[in-house]
Image (cartoon, rainbow, N blue to C red):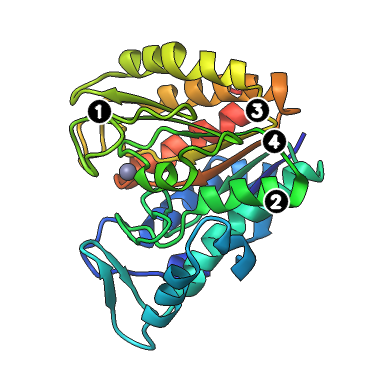
Amino acid sequence: MAIAYVSHYDCQMHDMGHHHPEQPARLSAINDRLIATGLEMVLHQYDAPLATREMLEAAHDSDYIDEIFAAAPKEGIKWVDGDTAMNKYSLNAALRAAGAVALGVDLVMEGKVKQVFCGVRPPGHHAERHRAMGFCLFNNIAVGAYHAINQYGLKRVAIVDFDVHHGNGTEDIVSGDERILFCSTFQHPFYPHSGYDTDVPNIVNAPLPSGATGKQFREAVEQHWLPRLEAFEPELVMISAGFDAHQADDMANLQLIDSDYAWVTRRLCEVADRWAQGRVVSSLEGGYELHALARSVEAHLKAFLGEN
Ligand SMILES: [Zn+2]
Protein backbone atom coordinates (compact mmCIF):
# COMPACT_ATOMS: atom_id res chain seq x y z
CA MET A 1 0.00 0.00 0.00
CA ALA A 2 0.98 3.59 -0.57
CA ILE A 3 3.29 5.78 1.48
CA ALA A 4 2.63 9.50 1.85
CA TYR A 5 5.20 12.28 2.07
CA VAL A 6 3.76 15.42 3.66
CA SER A 7 5.63 18.71 3.51
CA HIS A 8 5.20 22.35 2.53
CA TYR A 9 7.36 25.07 1.03
CA ASP A 10 6.71 27.25 4.11
CA CYS A 11 8.80 24.76 6.10
CA GLN A 12 11.82 25.70 3.97
CA MET A 13 11.25 29.43 4.49
CA HIS A 14 11.63 29.16 8.27
CA ASP A 15 15.22 30.32 8.84
CA MET A 16 16.92 31.01 12.20
CA GLY A 17 20.04 32.59 10.76
CA HIS A 18 23.11 31.78 8.73
CA HIS A 19 24.98 29.43 11.04
CA HIS A 20 22.05 27.72 12.70
CA PRO A 21 22.28 23.92 12.30
CA GLU A 22 18.49 23.58 12.02
CA GLN A 23 18.58 25.06 8.52
CA PRO A 24 16.40 25.05 5.39
CA ALA A 25 19.03 22.96 3.57
CA ARG A 26 17.96 19.96 5.65
CA LEU A 27 14.73 19.65 3.70
CA SER A 28 16.48 20.38 0.39
CA ALA A 29 18.93 17.54 1.08
CA ILE A 30 16.05 15.15 1.79
CA ASN A 31 14.13 16.25 -1.29
CA ASP A 32 17.21 15.90 -3.51
CA ARG A 33 17.78 12.40 -2.18
CA LEU A 34 14.17 11.38 -2.82
CA ILE A 35 14.53 12.53 -6.44
CA ALA A 36 17.96 10.93 -6.96
CA THR A 37 16.82 7.56 -5.61
CA GLY A 38 13.50 7.53 -7.44
CA LEU A 39 11.60 7.40 -4.16
CA GLU A 40 9.84 10.61 -5.13
CA MET A 41 8.05 8.66 -7.88
CA VAL A 42 6.75 6.13 -5.36
CA LEU A 43 5.57 8.50 -2.64
CA HIS A 44 2.15 10.14 -2.62
CA GLN A 45 2.95 13.80 -2.00
CA TYR A 46 0.69 16.05 0.07
CA ASP A 47 0.93 19.72 1.02
CA ALA A 48 0.76 20.19 4.78
CA PRO A 49 -2.26 22.21 5.95
CA LEU A 50 -2.09 24.72 8.80
CA ALA A 51 -2.87 23.15 12.17
CA THR A 52 -6.04 24.57 13.68
CA ARG A 53 -6.17 26.34 17.03
CA GLU A 54 -8.22 23.43 18.38
CA MET A 55 -5.52 20.93 17.36
CA LEU A 56 -2.79 22.99 19.05
CA GLU A 57 -4.82 23.41 22.25
CA ALA A 58 -4.91 19.64 22.72
CA ALA A 59 -1.14 19.75 23.35
CA HIS A 60 -0.37 23.33 24.42
CA ASP A 61 -1.74 25.91 26.83
CA SER A 62 -3.86 28.56 25.17
CA ASP A 63 -1.73 31.44 26.47
CA TYR A 64 1.43 29.78 25.14
CA ILE A 65 -0.13 29.57 21.68
CA ASP A 66 -0.99 33.28 21.97
CA GLU A 67 2.63 34.01 22.93
CA ILE A 68 3.99 32.28 19.82
CA PHE A 69 1.50 34.05 17.55
CA ALA A 70 2.42 37.37 19.17
CA ALA A 71 6.17 36.68 18.90
CA ALA A 72 6.05 36.10 15.12
CA PRO A 73 8.03 39.02 13.61
CA LYS A 74 7.04 40.92 10.49
CA GLU A 75 10.73 41.14 9.60
CA GLY A 76 14.07 40.07 11.03
CA ILE A 77 14.60 37.38 13.63
CA LYS A 78 12.89 37.06 17.01
CA TRP A 79 14.44 34.72 19.58
CA VAL A 80 11.91 32.81 21.71
CA ASP A 81 14.44 30.54 23.47
CA GLY A 82 18.25 30.44 23.74
CA ASP A 83 18.52 28.50 20.48
CA THR A 84 15.06 28.88 18.92
CA ALA A 85 14.09 31.82 16.73
CA MET A 86 11.31 32.93 14.40
CA ASN A 87 11.42 34.81 11.12
CA LYS A 88 8.36 36.04 9.27
CA TYR A 89 7.72 32.57 7.82
CA SER A 90 8.22 30.59 11.03
CA LEU A 91 4.70 30.77 12.42
CA ASN A 92 3.20 29.31 9.26
CA ALA A 93 6.02 26.75 9.06
CA ALA A 94 5.29 25.65 12.63
CA LEU A 95 1.55 25.51 11.97
CA ARG A 96 2.17 23.42 8.85
CA ALA A 97 4.62 21.12 10.67
CA ALA A 98 1.94 20.32 13.25
CA GLY A 99 -0.76 20.26 10.56
CA ALA A 100 1.32 17.78 8.54
CA VAL A 101 1.25 15.24 11.34
CA ALA A 102 -2.49 15.72 11.81
CA LEU A 103 -3.00 15.22 8.06
CA GLY A 104 -0.81 12.13 8.30
CA VAL A 105 -3.15 10.77 10.96
CA ASP A 106 -6.14 11.50 8.69
CA LEU A 107 -4.48 9.68 5.76
CA VAL A 108 -3.77 6.49 7.68
CA MET A 109 -7.07 6.52 9.59
CA GLU A 110 -9.05 6.95 6.36
CA GLY A 111 -7.06 4.09 4.82
CA LYS A 112 -5.66 6.23 2.01
CA VAL A 113 -2.09 5.20 2.81
CA LYS A 114 -0.41 2.82 5.24
CA GLN A 115 2.55 4.92 6.33
CA VAL A 116 3.29 8.64 6.34
CA PHE A 117 6.52 10.61 6.62
CA CYS A 118 6.26 14.31 7.41
CA GLY A 119 9.31 16.14 6.04
CA VAL A 120 8.80 19.25 8.11
CA ARG A 121 10.58 21.88 10.17
CA PRO A 122 10.64 23.32 12.75
CA PRO A 123 10.88 20.03 14.63
CA GLY A 124 8.67 19.54 17.67
CA HIS A 125 9.75 17.12 20.38
CA HIS A 126 11.42 19.67 22.68
CA ALA A 127 8.38 21.98 22.70
CA GLU A 128 6.64 21.63 26.05
CA ARG A 129 3.04 22.41 26.89
CA HIS A 130 4.04 25.95 27.79
CA ARG A 131 7.55 26.46 26.40
CA ALA A 132 9.42 26.74 23.08
CA MET A 133 12.77 25.01 23.28
CA GLY A 134 15.56 23.34 21.31
CA PHE A 135 14.59 24.57 17.80
CA CYS A 136 10.93 23.58 18.44
CA LEU A 137 7.79 25.78 18.60
CA PHE A 138 4.81 23.40 18.60
CA ASN A 139 5.03 19.72 19.49
CA ASN A 140 4.10 18.25 16.13
CA ILE A 141 3.96 14.60 17.17
CA ALA A 142 1.86 15.33 20.29
CA VAL A 143 -0.55 17.46 18.25
CA GLY A 144 -0.91 14.52 15.88
CA ALA A 145 -1.40 11.99 18.67
CA TYR A 146 -4.18 14.05 20.25
CA HIS A 147 -5.75 14.55 16.84
CA ALA A 148 -5.90 10.74 16.53
CA ILE A 149 -7.48 10.47 19.98
CA ASN A 150 -9.93 13.37 19.64
CA GLN A 151 -10.92 12.97 16.00
CA TYR A 152 -10.93 9.18 15.66
CA GLY A 153 -11.52 8.05 19.24
CA LEU A 154 -8.33 6.02 19.47
CA LYS A 155 -7.66 4.69 22.95
CA ARG A 156 -4.00 3.63 22.53
CA VAL A 157 -1.44 5.66 20.55
CA ALA A 158 2.26 4.82 20.73
CA ILE A 159 4.88 7.53 20.18
CA VAL A 160 8.46 6.37 19.74
CA ASP A 161 11.39 8.77 19.56
CA PHE A 162 14.87 7.76 18.36
CA ASP A 163 16.28 11.30 18.13
CA VAL A 164 19.61 11.57 19.98
CA HIS A 165 18.06 14.12 22.36
CA HIS A 166 15.40 13.24 24.90
CA GLY A 167 11.94 14.39 23.80
CA ASN A 168 11.33 16.41 26.94
CA GLY A 169 8.46 18.29 25.34
CA THR A 170 6.58 15.16 24.35
CA GLU A 171 7.16 13.70 27.80
CA ASP A 172 5.92 16.92 29.42
CA ILE A 173 2.72 16.85 27.37
CA VAL A 174 1.81 13.13 27.51
CA SER A 175 3.19 12.14 30.92
CA GLY A 176 0.48 10.38 32.92
CA ASP A 177 -1.92 10.09 29.97
CA GLU A 178 -2.48 6.34 29.74
CA ARG A 179 -3.91 6.66 26.23
CA ILE A 180 -0.38 7.35 24.99
CA LEU A 181 2.75 5.22 25.45
CA PHE A 182 5.94 7.25 24.89
CA CYS A 183 9.10 5.22 24.21
CA SER A 184 12.41 7.02 23.79
CA THR A 185 16.12 6.41 23.35
CA PHE A 186 18.58 9.26 23.79
CA GLN A 187 22.15 10.07 24.71
CA HIS A 188 22.63 10.64 28.44
CA PRO A 189 24.03 12.71 30.00
CA PHE A 190 23.26 15.25 27.29
CA TYR A 191 20.92 18.09 26.32
CA PRO A 192 18.17 18.60 27.49
CA HIS A 193 19.27 16.70 30.63
CA SER A 194 15.85 15.17 31.23
CA GLY A 195 14.18 11.77 31.02
CA TYR A 196 16.89 9.64 32.64
CA ASP A 197 15.11 9.53 36.00
CA THR A 198 11.48 9.58 34.85
CA ASP A 199 9.27 7.11 36.73
CA VAL A 200 5.85 7.35 35.10
CA PRO A 201 3.89 4.30 33.87
CA ASN A 202 3.30 5.52 30.29
CA ILE A 203 6.90 6.67 29.71
CA VAL A 204 9.62 4.19 28.61
CA ASN A 205 12.99 5.94 28.52
CA ALA A 206 16.17 4.10 27.56
CA PRO A 207 19.18 6.41 27.97
CA LEU A 208 22.33 5.47 26.02
CA PRO A 209 25.88 6.47 27.00
CA SER A 210 28.07 8.66 24.80
CA GLY A 211 29.69 6.48 22.13
CA ALA A 212 26.90 3.90 22.09
CA THR A 213 26.76 1.90 18.85
CA GLY A 214 23.91 0.64 16.73
CA LYS A 215 24.20 -2.70 18.54
CA GLN A 216 23.53 -1.01 21.88
CA PHE A 217 20.67 0.97 20.37
CA ARG A 218 19.09 -2.21 18.98
CA GLU A 219 19.46 -3.95 22.34
CA ALA A 220 17.73 -1.02 24.07
CA VAL A 221 14.87 -1.16 21.57
CA GLU A 222 14.51 -4.93 22.00
CA GLN A 223 14.73 -4.86 25.79
CA HIS A 224 12.81 -1.70 26.62
CA TRP A 225 10.57 -0.61 23.73
CA LEU A 226 9.30 -3.74 22.03
CA PRO A 227 7.91 -5.60 25.07
CA ARG A 228 6.05 -2.48 26.21
CA LEU A 229 4.76 -1.76 22.71
CA GLU A 230 3.50 -5.33 22.30
CA ALA A 231 1.78 -5.20 25.70
CA PHE A 232 0.23 -1.81 24.89
CA GLU A 233 -1.32 -3.01 21.60
CA PRO A 234 -1.22 0.43 19.93
CA GLU A 235 -3.92 1.37 17.41
CA LEU A 236 -1.48 3.80 15.79
CA VAL A 237 2.33 4.00 15.86
CA MET A 238 3.84 7.48 15.63
CA ILE A 239 7.56 8.19 15.25
CA SER A 240 9.57 11.23 16.28
CA ALA A 241 12.18 10.55 13.63
CA GLY A 242 15.37 12.39 14.50
CA PHE A 243 18.50 11.25 12.72
CA ASP A 244 21.10 13.06 14.85
CA ALA A 245 22.24 9.83 16.58
CA HIS A 246 24.01 9.03 13.28
CA GLN A 247 27.77 8.57 13.67
CA ALA A 248 28.38 11.25 11.00
CA ASP A 249 26.31 13.83 12.91
CA ASP A 250 28.54 15.86 15.22
CA MET A 251 25.60 17.32 17.14
CA ALA A 252 26.05 14.38 19.54
CA ASN A 253 28.14 11.27 20.14
CA LEU A 254 26.14 8.17 19.25
CA GLN A 255 27.29 5.85 16.47
CA LEU A 256 24.19 4.78 14.56
CA ILE A 257 24.45 4.12 10.82
CA ASP A 258 21.88 4.16 8.04
CA SER A 259 20.97 0.49 8.45
CA ASP A 260 20.12 1.00 12.13
CA TYR A 261 17.34 3.37 11.05
CA ALA A 262 16.08 0.78 8.56
CA TRP A 263 16.15 -1.86 11.30
CA VAL A 264 14.20 0.14 13.88
CA THR A 265 11.69 1.21 11.25
CA ARG A 266 11.04 -2.43 10.32
CA ARG A 267 10.54 -3.39 13.97
CA LEU A 268 8.04 -0.55 14.42
CA CYS A 269 6.22 -1.53 11.21
CA GLU A 270 5.93 -5.08 12.58
CA VAL A 271 4.31 -3.73 15.76
CA ALA A 272 1.98 -1.60 13.64
CA ASP A 273 1.13 -4.57 11.38
CA ARG A 274 0.25 -6.66 14.43
CA TRP A 275 -1.89 -4.15 16.30
CA ALA A 276 -2.54 -1.02 14.24
CA GLN A 277 -3.48 -2.25 10.77
CA GLY A 278 0.00 -1.16 9.73
CA ARG A 279 -0.65 2.50 10.48
CA VAL A 280 2.57 4.49 11.04
CA VAL A 281 2.92 8.29 11.06
CA SER A 282 6.52 9.52 11.26
CA SER A 283 7.70 13.10 11.55
CA LEU A 284 11.17 14.59 11.14
CA GLU A 285 12.87 15.86 14.30
CA GLY A 286 16.68 16.34 14.34
CA GLY A 287 19.46 15.33 11.95
CA TYR A 288 22.03 17.95 11.01
CA GLU A 289 24.72 16.29 8.87
CA LEU A 290 23.01 16.73 5.54
CA HIS A 291 24.32 13.64 3.72
CA ALA A 292 23.67 11.31 6.65
CA LEU A 293 20.26 12.88 7.20
CA ALA A 294 19.20 12.37 3.58
CA ARG A 295 20.50 8.77 3.46
CA SER A 296 18.87 7.93 6.79
CA VAL A 297 15.50 9.26 5.64
CA GLU A 298 15.94 7.14 2.51
CA ALA A 299 16.61 4.07 4.69
CA HIS A 300 13.58 4.91 6.85
CA LEU A 301 11.27 5.20 3.82
CA LYS A 302 12.66 2.11 2.10
CA ALA A 303 12.00 0.18 5.30
CA PHE A 304 8.37 1.30 5.03
CA LEU A 305 8.40 -0.24 1.55
CA GLY A 306 9.84 -3.44 2.98
CA GLU A 307 13.27 -2.89 1.44
CA ASN A 308 16.00 -3.31 4.02
ZN1 LIG B 1 17.91 15.95 18.35
Sequence-wise first label, 2 or 4:
2
Residue lying at the far bottom of the rendered structure: 74
| Callout 3 secondary element | loop
Q: Is residue 8 above or below residue 213?
A: below
Sequence-wise first label, 2 or 3:
2
- Dots 1 and 2: beta carbons under 8 Å? no
User: How far is disc 1 from disc 3 in space, using C-alphas?
Assistant: 28 Å
User: How far is disc 1 from disc 4 in space, using C-alphas?
Assistant: 34 Å
Sequence-wise first label, 4 or 3:
4
Seen at 60% across and 23% down, the residue is 307
- Dots 2 and 4: beta carbons under 8 Å? no
What is the x, y in percent for residue 7? 57, 58
Sequence-wise first label, 1 or 3:
3
Q: Give the residue type that dot 2 points to.
A: Asn
28 and 147: which one is in front?
147
Sequence-wise first label, 1 or 4:
4
Q: Which residue is mark 2?
A: 150
Q: Which residue is mark 1?
A: 254
Question: Residue 234's mark?
Answer: 3
Q: Quadrant of residue 232?
A: top right
| Callout 1 secondary element | loop
231 and 237: which one is in front?
231
User: How far is disc 1 from disc 2 in space, using C-alphas?
Assistant: 36 Å
Crowd rating for badge 1 (residues with CA inside 10 Å; few <14, some 14–19, many 20+): many
Question: Residue 155's mark?
Answer: 4
Crowd rating for badge 3 (residues with CA inside 10 Å; few <14, some 14–19, many 20+): many
